[in-house]
Image: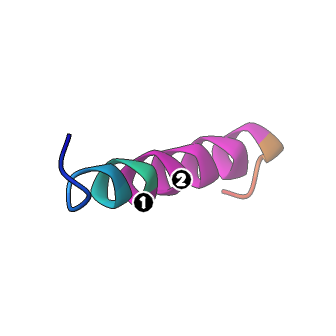
């Protein structure tokens, strides 16, 4: 397992989670 691969996944997941949470809260 590469250490350069883990952080990228975490950042991607965090970004998606934040976007989903914002949509769920009804920010739009």
Label 1 secondary element: helix
**Residue 14, labelled with which disc?**
2
Quadrant in the picture for the N terminus = top left
Give the residue pinned by disc 1.
11
Q: Quadrant of residue 18?
A: bottom right
Q: Nearer the viewer, residue 17 or 5?
A: 5
- The residue sitting at 18% across, 50% down in the picture is 2
Residue 23 part of the magenta segment: yes
Asked if residue 4 lies left or right of residue 22, the reply is left
Distance of label 2 from label 1 (alpha carbons): 5 Å
- The residue sitting at 58% across, 44% down in the picture is 17
Q: Main secondary structure of the magenta part?
A: helix
CB within 8 Å, label 2 to label 1: yes
Q: Nearer the viewer, residue 8 or 3?
A: 3
- The residue sitting at 44% across, 51% down in the picture is 10
Q: Nearer the viewer, residue 11 or 27?
A: 11
Residue 4 part of the magenta segment: no
Q: Which residues are magenta?
A: 11-24
Asked if residue 11 lies left or right of residue 20, the reply is left
* Residue 27 x, y percent position in the rendering: 74, 58
**Residue 24, labelled with which disc?**
none
């Amino acid at each position: 397992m590469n250490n350069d691969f883990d952080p990228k996944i975490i950042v991607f997941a965090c970004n998606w989670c934040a976007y989903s949470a914002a949509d769920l809260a009804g920010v739009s």
